[in-house]
Amino acid sequence: MKTQSRRGLRRFQQEVLYYGNSHYTERIAQLETALSRKPRTLQLDMVGVGEISADAALRIRSALMARSPKTQIITNSRSSLQNGSVLVWLLGDHRIILDDATLYFRRANLSEIKTAEPDEVWKDDEPKFCDSYSEVDPEEGDYARVLQLINEFFPVKELAGRLIGMPVLRQFGLVENEKMDHFLATCSRQKRGPAKTR
């Protein structure tokens, strides 16, 4: 990582891979270290044609939300993004993406997922038989959370399953819109609350 000054712009490259869970675990730890140095600006360069898993996207979000309120995040995508990668890109205070790149996220498949409720009466019933093809995938629950967070930026229900290009991103003020970037950054900082001091 090259820096202009101790607290100036830092660049952090995140490769977007298929099946890269161990890669993301290492990179998230490195991202947390870079953010702990409290740079004024950290540019997260996203490269590659894979996809960040829902779990990794949520962990990256957690690291970014815990940063110093004085650190600005620039997310710079050098390729099209899909699913969890879309959320990571949206988390930037300022977002950059190639003119011909697109975003894509699928709908969550929650038909068989039941969430345990705190006021639910617990029963000792045996679960119904289900084969390995019908088992619930916890990753799908994480992905549903990713979609909830994406929905804070634009309507997931209407845009899921469609390619989203630059005109739509401009329409929602997600690129090339300094006023909207400032507003979203302010909202993000309010949700994080004051920075923790050591």
Image: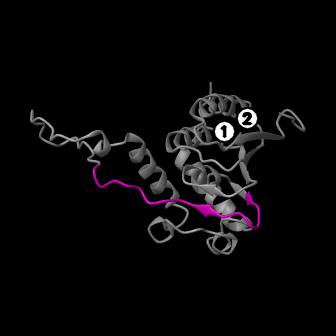
Kindly check if marks 1 and 2 are in contact, taking CB atoms under 8 A apart as contact: yes
The residue that appears at 76% across and 62% down in the rendered structure is 98
Q: Residues within 10 Å of mark 2 (few under 14, many from 20)?
A: some
Q: Tell me: residue 187, above or below residue 21.
A: below
The residue that appears at 66% across and 38% down in the rendered structure is 68
Q: Measuring from the top left, give residue 71's x and y in whole percent.
A: 72, 43
Quarter the C terminus occupies: top right
Q: Which residue is mark 1?
A: 68
Say the numbered circle drawn on residue 38: 2
Q: Quadrant of residue 194?
A: top right
Viewer-nearest residue: 103 or 7: 103
Viewer-nearest residue: 4 or 14: 14
Q: Measuring from the top left, give residue 47's x and y in whole percent.
A: 73, 47
Horizontal arrangement in the rendering, residue 187 relative to residue 151 (left or right)? right
In the rendered image, the residue lying farthest to the top is: 198
Horizontal arrangement in the rendering, residue 55 relative to residue 6 (left or right)? left
As shown in the figure, which amino acid type bears the numbered disc 1? Ser
Secondary structure mostly taken by the magenta-highlighted segment of the chain: loop
